[in-house]
Amino acid sequence: MTDAQSSPTNADLALMQRVAADDQSAIEELYDRFGPLVYRMAYQSMPSRSDAEDVVQEVFVRLWRTAARYDPKRAALVTWVMLISRRHMVDRLRRKQARVRAGALEEGWSPPADTTPSLAAMEQNENYRRLMERVERLPELQRTVVQRAYLRGQTLKQIGEDLNIPLGTIKSALSRALVRLRERNSGEELVT
């Protein structure tokens, strides 16, 4: 087993170094891992599906351009991707709001109510961010199982095979992780 395979941190760093070097297969791997997650977040935040699709494309361009700056000591890759995504979406919504306000002043027009994300959607995104922070604090195996099962959509059997760990151990790790997330969640609503 190589060093890059021995820990998710080293593997993530190696992936981002390949992305920074314009390795097409690394860029595709990054998109395959995080595209659905970024799209879900964008779909919940953006006023339309086409805006969400544009955001995903823009986020991955930004990830590609900033790949050399990724530091696994500061954040796990999934956290880094989500922070860049969130910042990009907030910036985009602010720019759109500014354009709408300027147009409204010039033309006496006011935007329809559905041009901005609802308060509920923004709260859901904030809950999601807090949940991801709690996931990052889980022990390594529990964190890996949660990320692969819930963020990548892998089955527990696939996870066990990929990690060369018995299925029972994977099930136990997931169960313990969910218990820990619920315990840390006391007083907050858990995003499912």
Image (spheres, rainbow, N blue to C red):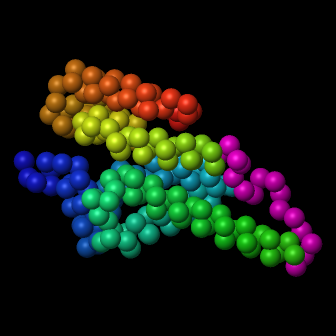
Asked if residue 148 shows in the view, the reply is no
Left or right: residue 36 versus residue 148 is: right
Up-down: is 84 above or below 162? below
Vertical placement of residue 88 versus 31, above or below:
below
Residue 158 location, quadrant: top left
Q: Residue at x 80, y 76 (%)?
A: 102
Q: State left or right for residue 188 relative to residue 153.
A: right
Asked whether, in this view, residue 164 is left or right of residue 64, the answer is left
Residue 116 counted in the magenta span: yes
How many numbered badges does the structure rendering display? 0
Q: Which residue is drawn at 61% across and 48% down?
A: 44
Percent of width and height locating residue 26: 28, 61
Q: Which residue lies furthest to the front in this view?
A: 187
Tell me if I can see residue 81 in this picture.
Answer: yes
| The quadrant where residue 144 appears | top left
Residue under the image location 72 percent in, 56 percent down: 116
Which residue is found at the position 71% from the left and 48% from the top? 118
Residue 9: where, in percent of width, then height?
23, 53
- In front here: 103 or 143? 143
Q: Give the range drawn in magenta.
A: 106-121
Residue 12 horizontal/vertical position (percent): 26, 56
Give x and y (percent) for residue 137. 34, 42
Q: In this view, does 37 lie above or below 63?
A: above
Instruction: Inspect the magenta stretch and tell me whether residue 149 lies in it.
Output: no
- Name the residue furthest left: 1
Q: Is residue 124 left or right of residue 22?
A: right
Residue farthest to the right, as pictured? 108
